[in-house]
Each structure stands twice: as structure tokens, then as C-alpha cells.
Amino acid sequence: MMRRTNIVLMKSCTTVLLFIAACISAYPQIAVTADPVGARPLTGESYLDVEGSPFLFSEWRKGAVTLEDGTTYSNLMLMYDQVSDQLIFKNTKGQTQIFLKPVKAFTIDGAPGDSLIFQTGYPPKQKAFYQVLVAGNTSLLKKETKVLMDEKEYGSARTVRHIVPSIGYFIVRNGQLKSVKLQRKSILAAFGDRHDDIERYIADRRLRLGEEASLVELALFYNTF
């Protein structure tokens, strides 16, 4: 089983590298510049006096962006607003701006040595960003949504605004997107054609099905068939 796990992990690394390359090279490379053109200053929601962060990371992170027209930019300072589902960047003058042209995909630095991959183009919300956890014949996506909620403090007229996050996972197969929960019944249904293999793998690996890492491992295992 350890040998099989190593094979799965090796295939995982290869798949992620190929996917990053595909995001960048799927369209002709039109331009790479220090500051993206066709951008404008960020306006609108300022998130003042809000409890919690609306962003994926609360600080600027390096990343790369591919627009729908094929233009690719690298070494940008990015932040991903998960309330508005909008990617913003900081130009060389330190100004916070947004892209005027639609963003197809982007990567952003996560843990040291790790890049998170986000992609659009999935039904039914074609413009929504999904994090790609596993890419393959069957892909595993993650969608973290954050909304602003107003609540009055108990016994007070003061209204407190805070961020409420929710996370969903999705399997994409044959162009169809299907929700999957971190529960045994939902996971087995998602990989139903390999029900016995998945059951056996869960038992052998003693996977905790309430954890994201276990779902990722199962999706990688499923793609080995």
C-alpha cells in the first residue's frame, strides 16, 4: 500500500505541474509586463469595521494571472476577495487595482513552496473562481464563499458586521460539476463506479472522511484507474 500511495503522490505532483502549465499555455502568450494594462483603481466595498477577513489571505501574496484573451502576467502582488469573488493586484506604484478584462486562471503563493491554483469556466457559474485541488479526468474543486452579515449585539443597538465563510467541494467529470460533502455517503456516491476500491482504500489508509486531505487523496487515487 505504501508503494501505491507513493505512486499516487507522484502522479499528483505531475498533474499539478501540468495543470499550471496548461493554465498559462492554453492561450497564446500576448504580453507580459510589469504592470497589467487595462486596469482601474479598486472602488466599492472597503470592509471598514468588519470582523474577519474577506480575503483568502490577509496580506499580499505573489502570483501569476492568465486573462481570457491569453495575456499572462507573472510576479504580481495579489489578493483574492472572496466576498466579491474578485482578484485584485498592487501595481508598481503601490496602487490597488482590478483587471478590466476577465481573468481565466491565477496562482497565488500559499504555504512555503506551494502555489494555490484557481480557475474559472465551470458550470453553472462560468465566471466564478474555484480552487483546483486535483486536476485529471475527474477534478476536485473547492469553493470558499464569504458573505457579510449584520447582527445586533445582545442588549445593544450597535450593529456588528462580520464575515461568514462557507466551503463547498465539487467533483468535475465529463464537463459536469457535482457537489460532494466530507461524508462517507456523499464521497462513495461521487466515486460510485469504483465503490469497492474506494471503500477498501479508505479502510487500508484509515482515512478521516471529515477532512479535506482525505478527499484529495481519494480523488488522486480514483484518477489512477
Image: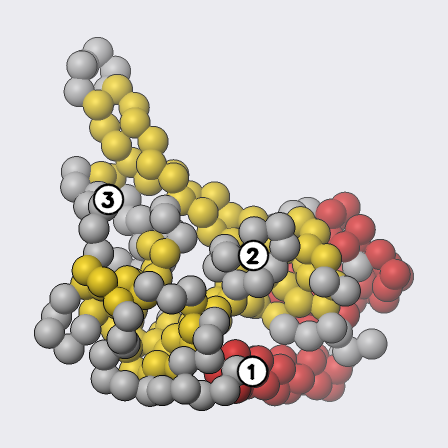
Q: Which residue is mark 1?
A: 26
Q: Residue furthest left?
A: 93
Q: Which residue is mark 3?
A: 45
Q: Is residue 215 above or below residue 63?
A: above
Rendered image quadrant of residue 16: bottom right
Say whether disc 2 or disc 1 marks the residue closer to the N-terminus. 1
Comparing 214 with 190, the one in front is 190
Q: Which image quarter holds the C terminus?
A: bottom right
Comparing 11 with 18, the one in front is 18
Q: Is the residue marked by circle 3 packed among few (<14), some (14-19), or many (20+) residues within 10 Å?
A: few
Which mark is in front, 3 or 2?
A: 2
Percent coordinates x, y for residue 150 in the rendering: 30, 27
Q: Is the residue marked by circle 2 packed among few (<14), some (14-19), or many (20+) residues within 10 Å?
A: few
Which residue is drawn at the image coordinates 73% and 47% (left, top)? 186
Say whether disc 3 or disc 2 marks the residue closer to the N-terminus. 3
Q: Is the residue marked by circle 1 packed among few (<14), some (14-19), or many (20+) residues within 10 Å?
A: few
> Mark 2 touching mark 1, by CB under 8 A?
no
Say whether disc 1 or disc 3 marks the residue closer to the N-terminus. 1
Q: Amino acid at mark 1?
A: Ala
Relative to 63, 22 lies left or right: right
Q: Amino acid at mark 2?
A: Gln
Q: Amino acid at mark 3?
A: Glu
Disc 2 to disc 1, how far (Cα)?
Answer: 17 Å
Disc 1 to disc 3, how far (Cα)?
Answer: 33 Å
Which residue is drawn at the image coordinates 77% and 78% (left, top)? 224
Picture disc at residue 126: 2
Question: Disc 3 on helix, strand or loop?
Answer: loop
Query: Quick check: can you spot residue 120?
Result: yes
